[in-house]
Amino acid sequence: MSNVEQTLSIIKPDAVERNLIEEIKNIFIKNNLNIKNSKKIHITKDEAAEFYKVHQSKPFYNDLCGYLSSGPIVVMILEGKSAVAENRKLMGATNPKDAQENTIRKLYGISIDKNSVHGSDSLENAKKEINFFFKN
Ligand code: CMP
């Protein structure tokens, strides 16, 4: 099948803490995004800083890195047709307040920081982000 892609998804500390892992995984599965690989990890602030390097000039960078390293997260490779765009559609807008009904961030997000999930924003970044967490 053409345009089958892989993308990286992260279930962030706020959602792991509230035991939302299975609910969120089920949303992906029901929407034809197969979970090819999944692991629960707790990264350091330095690792978070490396992962979010594209945001290093942003005023929220330090808090963002502190937050992603504040507790366990679940990193996953999602695979499916137009997986990058499909995952972003399922997540909804970055700020849960702006997210459409029934998107993950609308259902579960608490704030722009505690927005429950991360997803790669392009195919190019998906490759980099998958490689960051799932190096062979
Ligand atoms: P995420 O998709 O993980 O990518 C970067 C994160 O920065 C984003 O989700 C938000 O949780 C967080 N963030 C905090 N403040 C902002 C902001 N003003 N604009 C965009 N993202 C922000």
Image: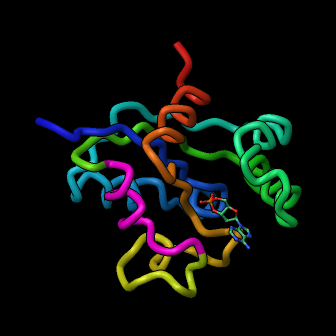
- Rendering coords of residue 116 (x, y %): 57, 64
Left or right of 18, for residue 65: right
Left or right of 24, for residue 41: right
Q: Where ligand 1 lies, by quadrant?
A: bottom right
Q: Is residue 109 a member of the stretch shown in magenta?
A: no
The residue at the point 22 percent across, 41 percent down is 3
Residue at the far left in the pictured view: 1
Residue at the far top in the pictured view: 136
- Rendering coords of residue 12 (x, y %): 61, 55
The residue nearer to you, when weighing 67 against 40, is 67
Q: In which quarter of the image is residue 109?
A: bottom right
- Rendering coords of residue 52 (x, y %): 72, 46
Q: In this view, does 57 lie above or below 134?
A: below
- Rendering coords of residue 92 (x, y %): 45, 72
- Where are the magenta residues, as a range? 83-94
Q: Is the magenta stretch mostly helix, strand or loop?
A: helix
